[in-house]
Amino acid sequence: MCGRAFRAADVPMCIAAAGTPVQTIVWVNDAFVRRTGFTVDQIVGQAPGWLLGPDTDPEPIDRFRSAIADGQPWAETLRTVAADGTPSWTRVSSAPVTGERGTITHWFYVLVDVTDLEERHREQLAEVERERRERTSIGIISRISDILMDLDDPSALGEVAGVLDHSVVRWADFYLEDDDGIRLADGSATRAYRVGRRHPAVVEVAAVARDTEVSPLTETSPRTYRADPVRALLDGVRTEPVDLDLTTDDSSSVSAWLADQVRKAVEALPDAPARVVVLPVPGRRRVLGVLVVVPWGGTDAATIDSSVGTVLRLTTRRVGLAVDNVRLYEREHRVAETLQRSMLPEQADVDGLDVWTYYAPSSAHAQVGGDWFDVVAIDADVVGVVIGDVVGHDIEAAASMGQLRSVVRTYAFEVRTPGLVLERVDQLVAGMRIPRPAALVLMTLTRTGDTWQLAYSRAGHLPGLLVRDGHVTELDGAGGRLIGISVGTRTTSEIPLEPGDVLVLYTDGLIERRDRALRAGLAALRDAAASVTATDAAGIGEDLLARLADDPEDDVAVVVVRVPDPAVDGSVARSPRSRRWRLASEPAAAGRARHAVVRTCEAWGLTCGPSAELVVSELVANAVLHGWGHVLLRLDDTQDGLRIEIEDANPAPPVTTDGHRGRVGGFGMQIVERLADWGWRPAGTGKVVWAKIRDAEDTDD
């Protein structure tokens, strides 16, 4: 009765005799034959394993053997194959059948087709995995976007590569190309590899080049591109990822150079790969560099699945856009700095006077403003000093400032009396229709023998200060209306100067704050000027800035003029022991920096002046040659020597070289290393290079 029921059942069943070392099937029902497609003769006498296909997971089979050996029931879902080769998912259950003595004589098997259920389950798992990957990808892209918000940091792309490392791929690094060549983009001081100047038309026809083996507008041959796939990526000829063999030894190609760099970087990985995948980093109009990765589970582009490929493509596009934006800003920054440099004069060296000047915009993002100063030697015995402030903080105010500066300077050479100069300026400004009024103070200092005579006239500007023997006098005479308001008579005040006298001219940004009245700020300036103990113009200016300009809310311009006093100038200044100069990014800046260092060492009584002069000359020259924008020079007394800091707007670190082959130069940083301890750090959108020279240290050996 039971046998007929099992044979007629719609569920495939079979019985295998317990044997050693394998079982053999001794009975099957009709449903088993229909399910598998095999006949009874083909099945009976065979081992149960004939149902397994080549893609069956071996792990459940191992568990099946263990269950059989232990005499325990077993059930697993397996990938099986029918007689016609059709694969399916089958739930296979087995149970032991014992004899009279309790020994296992047979095994009873039941097969249930669960293909539809298993495929739905696997589709659900795949969908869950896709969603997980998408969420992971979104999180990774979000983290990368946050890092790229601060791409001015030289190590930012190193952080982006770190996000990709061990999450999306096994290993990743960016290499960017600039005017100096291609280099690792992680903020380290690595030397660039010269790729060679590409034809300018390559950038314009990149879309055409992608559809051809080689752009007809380049002199590079198709054979060269086949041998140098990284160059093809950089030139925009190829757009898809390429596989890079790390064992290549053609030293003349950028691919070989990159392979050498990457080989050194990945040699510490377990099972160090012999190949990597290189993806282009596209900008708006040209390829900016490459991303090099080692994928999980392989070393070529074919092993990168779609989700990983999407993350890598999005990453390279975002990095390219961010780098493009930074470079565009840098270009605009250089243009703005050039405009500012053309409007603001550099500090003049005046025979017989100690002069110090300072200017800073109210914001780190401001490039030009309405404040200005000028110090001009009209002739051997007459010096003109002017400080002014045009109403407003925009390009129009800056343009008005440039016009007024030129007009005042021109008339100062023709007329020596400040009041008369301003009258002529009024008349010309009325005709020129300069749109913004301006406040200014014009002074002339005339030398007669060993004495100086001061004459000045004010046009609505705050009064300058005269500091004599610790007493401060406001130079509030010869006042008048703003420039550009009306035309009329202006007056001139005169004061004889004595040795040691100090003149302080400033704009309102030095003293004006929202939380205090302008008169209170002027009183604070008077108190600070009266308590200064430095005996040189730079020291006095630095002391005033330290006390008053810590958090300015407007542009700040300051001019300090001191009449030398032979009885005092031989002594060492007591405070402050810090100096700062703003220099133009031009070759003459190195000479001005040397002069500033020599004077400072003399004022502070330091004996390291010769070494400091040479070091600052090299550092400023490097900033002018490789940086952009103004160069900031800062000197600090460290009690045991001198600390020099040079700041420029180029974030790329300095690199020590062995000279430039075929031309003079390239040994500057070697000279610095010989004479001083040195280093660098990021600062704002640029960097600061510092050097410390110990006083009285023997550097000749």
Image (cartoon, rainbow, N blue to C red):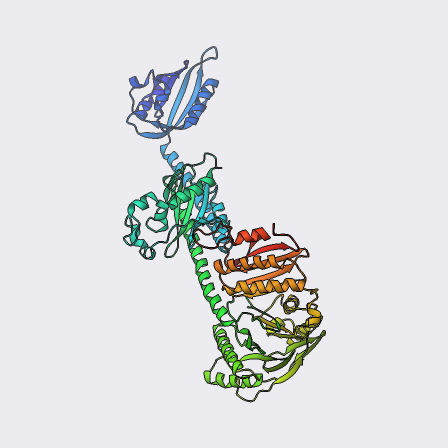
Relative to 263, residue 458 above or below: below
Q: Residue at horizontal 47%, vertical 37%?
A: 267
Toward which corner of the image does residue 252 lie, by quadrant?
Answer: top left
Q: Residue at horizontal 51%, vertical 58%?
A: 622
**Relative to 250, is 581 on the left or the right?**
right
Q: Can residue 477 be seen at all in this image of the molecule?
A: no
Toward which corner of the image does residue 692 lie, by quadrant?
Answer: bottom right
Residue 419: x, y in percent? 57, 85
Residue 26: x, y in percent? 35, 15
Q: Nearer the viewer, residue 606 or 503?
A: 606
Relative to 207, residue 431 above or below: below
Relative to 445, residue 573 above or below: above
**Relative to 293, is 440 on the left or the right?**
right
Toward which corner of the image does residue 421 lie, by quadrant?
Answer: bottom right
Residue 34: x, y in percent? 30, 25
Q: Quadrant of the N terminus?
A: top left
Q: Nearer the viewer, residue 16 or 678?
A: 678
Q: Nearer the viewer, residue 430 or 698?
A: 698
